Amino acid sequence: MPVCGDCDPERAFPSVKALVIHLQVFHKYHSLSTYRCCEGGCERKFTNVKCFKRHVLMSHAPSNTGDVESEVGTPRVVDDASLSNQLTGENGHAFSSMNEEFDLSVSNSSFGDFVRHNAAVFVSKFYGKPSLPRNVVQEIIDETQNLIIQGSVVMDMLKTKVMRTLTSVEAPTSDIEEITAMFSALETPFDHLKTEYLRLKYFEASGYYVPPKTIMIGKQLENVKTKEGTIKATWVDVTAEHIPVSPILKQFLELPDALSSILKFMDLFSNDPDSISNVIQGELWQRKRAKYPANAVVLPLFGYYDSFQADNVIGPHCRPIGGIYISIGCLPPKIASKLENIFVSTLFHAADMKEFPIERFIQPLLDELESLKEEGIEVLPFL
């Protein structure tokens, strides 16, 4: 099993992904860190996390492993063997060699990735504050970039000094070009995040942003004012915004200790049949749970509706908004009450429910829950 050599005593992990998450969260590893393989006294070092994963999977894979697969509506725990298959087929072909050596020099691409990644982390902290408008986030980014540009005089002085030193010692041309590119990366860290469009595209591609999908509810007549100043009855689309639940649940359950905490909490209730304090102890859940294999991991999901007003209640643009939410019904109490653990599924104008049946608004969620019931989701837990 993968082992963390930075822990004292050494700590073993069920998968290489769990080890990498542990190193990045608890030991502050980043894209420039050196990953050291401590399994079986190997002590090989890697500056690329993908190369480190590949080495652990192929050089230290257990001889007999199998997927612990869930059936209906369950997260599926994937072991090292299946993870190896996923990584091997990620780019459509197998890795070329399992014995390839990697030097410890920092490549230009890894340095640039490191700068861009940290710029994205910087921006994401502002996106995580609901009270901060997007135009303020844009202003912060612009002003930060201006600050970097204003300090470019100092950067140019440093760059000139470094280049003269490298030239005087007759450094290889490739090294000089690489360091020049590093300086360029430091001068423009927000180039890939300079607009709202680019930011959302970057976070979506990184898997940290799940964009909503527009759902057509129907059409209705509305009085629309024309350019001539007249009022004309026009058919307009009635839509709702649906956020896919599956990727949200996957990201949540792959957080450190998330799935293991839920399973331990469920075990506590299963060992206490005399009192009922959670839905999983009731007869309704027991009947539903009996439909699935005993070794399947099955979690209850709650869905509910509520409406709220997002604008000034006495303002001209105040329209109640309807929201459909879901939550995991067996979370430990200390995290179950947090708003961040209640997931938004669908948003729409609450007044539209008077014109259209509620089934049209909840159908996207029902379809997705049915898919979860039949196919489940694959989860690589941090245990």
Image (tube, rainbow, N blue to C red):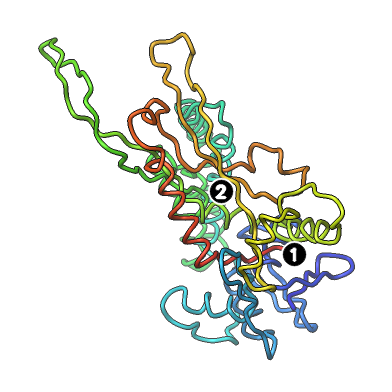
Instruction: Identify which residue is drawn at 64% across, 54% down.
Output: 300
Quarter holding the N terminus?
A: bottom right
Q: What is the quadrant of residue 166 in the picture? A: bottom right
Secondary structure beneath label 1: loop
Which residue position is annotated with label 2? 161
Secondary structure beneath label 2: helix
Instruction: Identify which residue is drawn at 77% across, 76% down.
Output: 38
Is 369 rendered above or below residue 315? below
The residues bearing labels 2 and 1 have C-alpha atoms spaced at a distance of 49 Å
| Three-letter amino acid code at the position of disc 2 | Lys
| Residue 124 coordinates in the image, percent (x, y) | 55, 41
Which residue position is annotated with label 1? 383
Quarter holding the C terminus?
A: bottom right
Whether residue 28 is visible here, answered yes or no, is no
| Residue 187 coordinates in the image, percent (x, y) | 48, 43
Relative to residue 43, is residue 231 drawn left or right? Answer: left
- Counting residues from the N terminus, which is met first, the one under dot 2 or under dot 1? 2
Is 31 rendered above or below residue 321? below
